[in-house]
Structure formats: C-alpha cells, structure tokens
Image (cartoon, coloured by chain):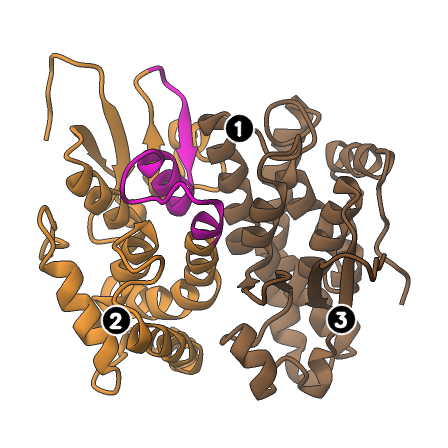
Chain colours: A orange, B brown
Amino acid sequence: MTNRNAPQLRVYGDLLSGNCYKIALLLSHLDTPYEWVHIDILTGASHTPAFLARNPIGKIPVLELPDGRNLFESNAILNFLADGTALLPSDPWLRALVLQWQFFEQYSHEPYIATARYIAKYLGLPESRRAEYQAKQTGGHAALGVMETQLSRHDFFVGERFTIADISLYAYTQVADEGGFSLDGYPAIRRWLARVAALPRHMPMPAD
Amino acid sequence: MTNRNAPQLRVYGDLLSGNCYKIALLLSHLDTPYEWVHIDILTGASHTPAFLARNPIGKIPVLELPDGRNLFESNAILNFLADGTALLPSDPWLRALVLQWQFFEQYSHEPYIATARYIAKYLGLPESRRAEYQAKQTGGHAALGVMETQLSRHDFFVGERFTIADISLYAYTQVADEGGFSLDGYPAIRRWLARVAALPRHMPMPAD
C-alpha cells in the first residue's frame, strides 16, 4: 500500500521469507501504509554495500523510517511498530512473555523449521545439504511440541489475545510443511493457525 | 545474596553459562537480592518434570518471581528486570535498538560462539563434534566483525551508554577464547570488554 503524499515506512524484504512476512502481517493488522522494497537474497541483494549499511549482518527484513534510520531483526521491528497498539500489551509481565516467545521463536523454532524450509524450497534440497535438512527434524518437532502444549491450554500465546508473539510464531509454522514438518500430530497448533487466519485484516503469505 | 526476610527473586541456572551469567550480571548492577539455584544441564537437571514445568524447552536460565510465576529466555528476563531502570532506555527507538542487538546476539552470535565454547569446554571437544566446532568459526567471526564495526564508532551498543544490550553481548564475547575465537583482530571489542569490566558493581563470571 503506498501513499505518495506522506512520508512513510519502507520495508526491505522478501514476502516469501517468514521473517519478512511477519512485518507485512503486522502492518496489515495495524492498517499502516508502507512501501515494500523486494530484496532477493539468492542474487546477493542483501550483501551489497548499500544494504550492509542498513544491516551489517546482511539479512532481511530491514525497516527504514521516513528520516532514514534503519532497524533490523524481525522481532525488534515488530516490537517497535506494535508499541502502543493492542498487539503489544502495556503490562510489563505480558510484554516479557511476548519477548519470551519471540526469543524462543528465533532460537528454538526458526533455525530448525525455517532453515529446513529454506533448504527444501529455495535451494531445492540438494544432496549436499540433505543430512543437515534431516538433522533439523528433531529440533523442529521439539519446538512444535512446546507450542502444542501452550496452545492446548490457551487460544493465543500471551494474555489470551492475539499479539505480536502470535505473529512471530505464525510466520514459519503456517509453512512448516514446506520444511518437511507435518502438523498432523498437532491439533491445537492447527486450530490456532485457523484462528489467526480468520482474524479481520489478516494477510496471507502470497503464493510463489 | 539472600535476604531471608523478604520474598525475592529466584534464578535457576549455571553461572558458567553465558546466558545465565547475564542475569547475575544485571542483578549485580541493579543491586537486587536474589536466590541462585544451580542447575547442572550435563546431569539432566534441566529436563526433570519439575524443571520442564518452569520452562518446557528445558533450558536455563529461568526466573521465578516470589508469587511463583516463571519466565524463560535470558534476554526476555533482562528486559523484564531492567524495565524502568537506567539499564533499559524508556525511549521507544532506543528500546528497539536494544532488542535488535539482543536478537542479533541470540541468532548470529550465541549459536556460533557459545556453542563452540560448549563443545570445547563442557564436552571436551570430542572427535565426533570436531567438524561442527570448526564450522562455527565463520559465523562467529562474522558476528565479531559486526560488533567491531559498531564498537569502533560507539563506546556502547545503544544510546552511548551501558544497557542490557551490552550485557547480552558481553556474556559470551568475554569468553570467546574458550570457543577458539581469538580477539586479537578486534581492538574495539577488547576496549569495550575492558570498559564493561571496569564499571561499578561489575561482577565477573566466576572461575570454574
């Protein structure tokens, strides 16, 4: 969504990347206009000097403010954009729980489920990375097991309502099958995925 | 530090783990009393049913409040404990930058530097994990390079003052040599390590 009359947010990313899709999903819920700049990591677009000046680790997404400041790390961007809205509680304990689930996502979920998906979907599961792909299964199912337990007791991860903790975990869980993770054994996760997708202003990840 | 007269915070962890040491270092700066409960991950103490009820992913540290609520993920704990203190800015942009560096730490630093240290120091660098240990070098030096650039321009990571972003990155960087990472090529990091260690109320990681 672009409004040329107002200075606006710019997001550098790839909508098929869960980490980038998180930002688009939040901005859809917030009904905030933004400009999306597509970055193709497979052609090195995240490692040009211009991009590395925005994010020295060369990863997407990056948020650019109208005044030119840049912020990287998807979950830091979510916290910044959602601050003061219904999608990030103001209560300190609930905010801590949001962060708890977001750090869980980045350490115990994304490196297994997103990386397996990347190897399969982006790289075409080359023989040279098949062992690594297989090795991701145990950690990915451990993360899904933790999510299943939480979601069998609660409709959402924090405070019994939809927050950016759900957005963080939704992004790659909804495409876990593309990394070889069947959700057949996780009925609470499947109900939660449907609950999130049915919310007003939900934006699905685009097809390829 | 234990004050038996007041309900107090309890931390479950191992002070030789950087993720746990972060919490002790922050509590030292805040001069907050707490009880430390040692958890030996090598003997399975983080996977007992009692511990998994505190943290279903079976990792340390865990913070327990006087009323029995539990919080896991080291950086979520830091944000909760530092909220409202000088170690976590109140400005939304600076808070976002703190989170940016903390997510960088958990995704791009800890999995290389802390894991290499774990394989070498805790497991004794067994032959079966030597290839994995070697493979951590590239990512670890990439993270150190990003830190070096930032610290060559700034005394601390965020807002020109000591914050929990520094605590998060200090914990494993100060023992990077134990993971096989020499800091000889990182003069700005070495000056920053000395700057942090010289702060009032600094608590070094204990010797073995």
Report which residue position mark 2 lands on: A176
Of labels 3 and 1, earlier in sequence is 3
Above or below, B138 against A59 in this view is: below
Foreground of the two, B66 or B155: B66
Tag 1 near tag 2, CB within 8 Å = no
- State the SS at label 2: helix
Residue flagged by tag 2: what amino acid is it?
Ala
In this orientation, does residue A133 appear?
Answer: no
User: Image quarter for residue B138?
Assistant: bottom right
Q: Position of residue A103 (x, y in %)?
A: 47, 57
Identify which residue is drawn at 35% across, 15% down.
A67
Q: Which residue is mark 1?
A: B90
Q: Which residues are magenta?
A: A67-96
- Can you give x and y, in whole percent of width and height, for residue B188 in the image? 74, 31
Q: Quadrant of the C terminus of chain A?
A: bottom left
Chain letter, disc 2 residue: A
Name which residue type carries label 3: Val
Q: Is residue B134 magenta?
A: no
Q: Say which residue label 3 marks.
A: B37
Whether residue A85 is in magenta: the answer is: yes
Residue B46 screen position, x and y as percent: 63, 79
Q: Are marks 1 and 2 on the same chain?
A: no
Q: Is residue B129 visible?
A: yes
Alpha-carbon span between mark 3 and mark 2: 37 Å
Give the quadrant of the N terminus of chain A: top left
